[in-house]
Image: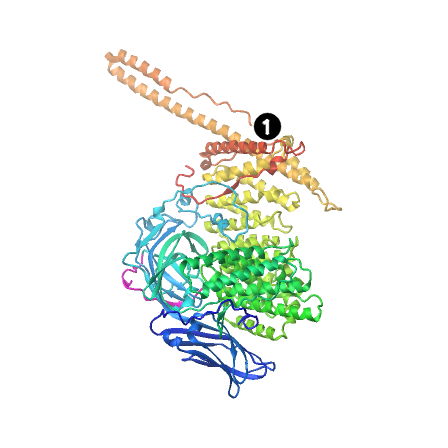
Amino acid sequence: MGICGSTTKQPIDQICKLSQPIITSGELQIKVLLKNIKLKMPDIRQCSIEFDLGRCKYTSPVHVNNEGEHYWRASFDGLLLMTEQQMRETNIKISVLTSSVIGQAQINLFETAVGPFHFELPIRGQNSGNVSFDLKMNQIVQATLQSKYIIWELNQSLNEVRYNYNLRLVTSQLSYISEHSSTFTNPNYRKQNEKKSTQFQTSRKSILDQDSIKDSLTSLSRLPSLKSPPNPSYDSVAATPTHKANHRIEWDHINDELTMIVELPIQEFQGSALQLCLWSISSNRRSLDNIKSPQKTIIKKTKNQHDSEYMDLEIQDHHLVAETYINLSNMETSVSAEQGAKLLMIKSYQPKSLWYHGVEVGKIDYEISVRIPNHLQQSSFGVQTDRGIVSSISVVGNVENISVTEIKMIQMEFQKLSSSIFKMEHKSLNIDEKLKVRQEMDQNLTRLAQFLGQSHGSAIKTFQYKSEDDLMKAQQLLIQISIHLVDYSKTLSTFDSYYECLNQVLSRGELMLQQLGFFKALNKKQSNQKIEVCLNYQTFLINTLRYTLSKLSQKDPSNEARKLYIKILVISYFRIPEFRVKFLELINKPNDPQLNELRGTEFIQEDDPTNIDKSTKNNISIFDWQNYFHTYLNDKTQGIQNQSALNQILDDESWKENIRHRSINFSFFVEEWAIYVRNILQVKILPWQDIPGYRILVKAFMCELKQQDSVPDAMKIGLRSLMQNVNLLGIIVSLQFNKTNLYNTEQVIETFEILDICFSTLTAMPPYFDYPFLLKGIKQIIIDSEHAICIAKCLWFIYNIYPLLQSKHISYQSVEFKKDLCEFIFEKAVFKLFLHWSKTVRMMFHYFLLYRVSHQHKNPKVGGLDEEQIIQQYTLINRPKKNQSYFENRQPQQQLISDYIYMKYMRFLSKVEQAKINEGEREYQQDYKSYYQRLVTKKLKMEQEQKLRQVAEPKRESLKLERLQSEQEEQTQNQLKPVIVPRTVMHKKLSFKHDIEITDKQQQYVLISIREFEEQLKNYNNWRQSNIKKVMGKYNEEDKHTIHLTFEVPKMDILKRIDEKEGA
């Protein structure tokens, strides 16, 4: 029963609820759960206990204990049928049995149903003692849900002719599914057979036919759990016109509300979530209108699944478009009273996100009414005693003599919070009084979080204590506060500061193994105190784990609640070894794909089922809770009870499917897991392979990454955290390239987004990385792909990772990669990119040339050499040598390659200049040819006219005059354009020439691209000059030529695009 039987209670106020008026009608159905029965009778070695609730009875098995401390692990689950009046007239009778009744206690049944579920009662009779237990009474109610209006706003255009939606109530065990709503007909529908599509995008038209390309990375930074700095400003290289009429679906119900009636326990309903699902109806299937009942919907009950793949019901032509969850435990409601019931209105005070397979696809506005009949409900705060309801808060101990002032302030603030909760739960208050008490609770929680967040140390959040006794008093206080905060989550979960309090107390250094572990010898008194503290913390860990696992299947928790649940899971993973073993067994699926990408790495290919956690063989002591904590508690009575409770949790199947499924919670777990390890091991280089379960965890994540067709945003966040181990970079690059189809646009785009996330976490390239494989993938995309956005995304990726190749401590392999990359771009792909039909590709390439190549490699002295001479010097420096040194200066190598790249860039500019001249000459030739054709046409016309004049001799003189006048006018209009004299090609010092090879398709974009490049060059020069003015006078003469490298260059992004005129 938690701590109720082991703490001293100070009654704040005794409450008796029998005087309250009757609020229900008819016979009530109440589920009864009796558990955690503890009995203290010093003189009784063996006994059983009987609970008589009037219409149901439970007798426990016989328990034997020489010290008279009896504990029954078994629980009783039954159903009670009574009216409220009968409950007021009935007492629960508790009898202790040996061969006869040796003691009894009783309490009113109605007070049990409306008070707290913790009980502590005295046993009187032949023998005396105390009994404590938990009795939960959960009334079954009939809830009615009706949708008033729902507006779906999708990111993509509607591409089906008909749509409808339905409701799904998801509880911890079951799902209740309604029928579908009335059908919405899309007025802008276009038949699919009128659209032209091809499997491979090989032409400009096929690219333009696509509706849109979604860039999901821009939405990633909006996630609250992502640890990233504020978003920088981005330059977008494509825009998207939106037509909201083609994206919007609206149901404004007046007489055709979608109604769902559900019968379930009230606590199940309050902890459930309402799922709204939007469905498209295939145009070649029948409509649902013929089968939809116009009356109230009969619900359909199904087994609860952990995703939305329940489409194979009775309608096979429905396809899920979007979904969202509304958490009914944390909903914003306006409550009004009806006769015998409460009416709650669920409204969206701001648009809520719609999701499909982990990707945000739109927003939704809604209003849904929920009608719940009046019911009896228990509280989680306080303890039922023979004197009435009293507060269970007399938080341990006496900390008056403790040396740390902050600990005293924490206790005082928590006592104030407890008083406020007691008033809210058990006193009759009007609306104004309740609002005032809630304000007090919010203020108490805020101050408590501030005190818990204070620290005397910088590395670990802890206070400095003068003695071991002071430390143990503080630990006991923090443990008891944690227990109570978890117990009162139902009352406090609506406050954001509540989750902050729990986060702060869970992060305290006093509760880490360094302080709780048995690392040094203590005297007998201190040893007993420490064991008591550790037993209480062990109890807290197990009870909190049970609470968290019950919340895993909850849909749409708040961000703060989800972060807390995941943090508790991570703490349990490291501090409860049995749970860690079970967790790793669940995520290690037998049907996972073979990861060939792991070959040659330190990751194990085949796991030994007899020892799933191989990494614990070389475990770090700071994670060894088994040997330094649990081993010392196993032989204690409370320790045995805790182990029994843990075994029950591990044997429970209700939570395992969620872990085995490796859903979104798994990705958040990986993120929090990496943060926890970083906080515990505050060293520069982490020994990842010695951390318990690391290999299995990473392999499971990689398998999930490989199997996902569309990677959810949460998985991208988890991947960012895993990249703290930079050696994973090569594995991820290999995995993503191997699973990507070159002709699948979405896969190519997502691959570069994922790789950009990985590279963005690095400050320098890892020492072991397969550069040729990365270069091969880049070449294949640029050369073989004809899809504009794929090529632009590849350039975007190169633009983002290029600064990593400029590090001062760059390796020889990185220098070679940069050289090979630029050789490929400037020798084989330069004109495909510079003269591409897509403006997006051209603009992205212009930015790369100006802000990466020219900006970083510019050297006015480069004109004295050519490429061949530079490569000869570079080869000479890197020739094999017998004596090598770590301190060898690599700067000459980097400078030579930098000059080499800039030389390539300068030669490209000369080609551009030559292409511009050639284009001018080509236009001149075309104009001359056109003029010559006009002259020939004119001559033929004059000959015909001359023949006509010979026939009509009398009119010769007049026609001659007209002809002369006409010739004079035509000469004026058709004068030849001035001949363009070719200008000298710029960059004259370049040693050898390359012919300019431009295809006919590229020819039409020469002048267009040159104009755009010149415009971007002006913008670049303006940007450079403005930055130089900002640092004017802040650098010395030595830094004059390198100061520009410190400027923050613009960040680029590729937006989704619908542009039918692009490239015209």
Residue 1051 is a magenta residue = no
Question: The C terminus lies in which quarter of the figure?
Answer: top left
Q: Position of residue 628 (x, y in %)?
A: 66, 67
Q: Which residue is mark 1?
A: 988
Q: What residue is at 64 percent from the left and 68 percent from the top?
A: 629
Label 1 neighbourhood size at 10 Å, few (<14), some (14-19), many (20+)? Answer: few
- Magenta stretch encompasses residue 286: yes
Q: Say if 677 sits above or below 872 in the image.
A: below
Asked if residue 230 shows in the view, the reply is yes
x then y, percent, for residue 414 = 55, 61
On the image, the x and y values in percent for residue 115 come to 45, 70
The residue that appears at 24% across and 15% down in the rendered structure is 952
Kind of residue indicated by mark 1: Lys
Against 62, residue 865 (above or below) is above
Along the line of sight, the residue nearer the viewer: 313 or 270? 270
The extreme right residue here reads 883
Q: Secondary structure at mark 1?
A: loop
Magenta segment, prevailing SS (helix, strand or loop)? loop
Quarter of image, res 908: top right
Quarter of the image holding residue 860?
Answer: top right
Q: Is residue 307 left or right of residue 804?
A: left
Say if residue 708 shows up in the picture.
no
* Bounds of the magenta segment: 284-305
Q: Relative to 481, is 1012 above or below?
A: above
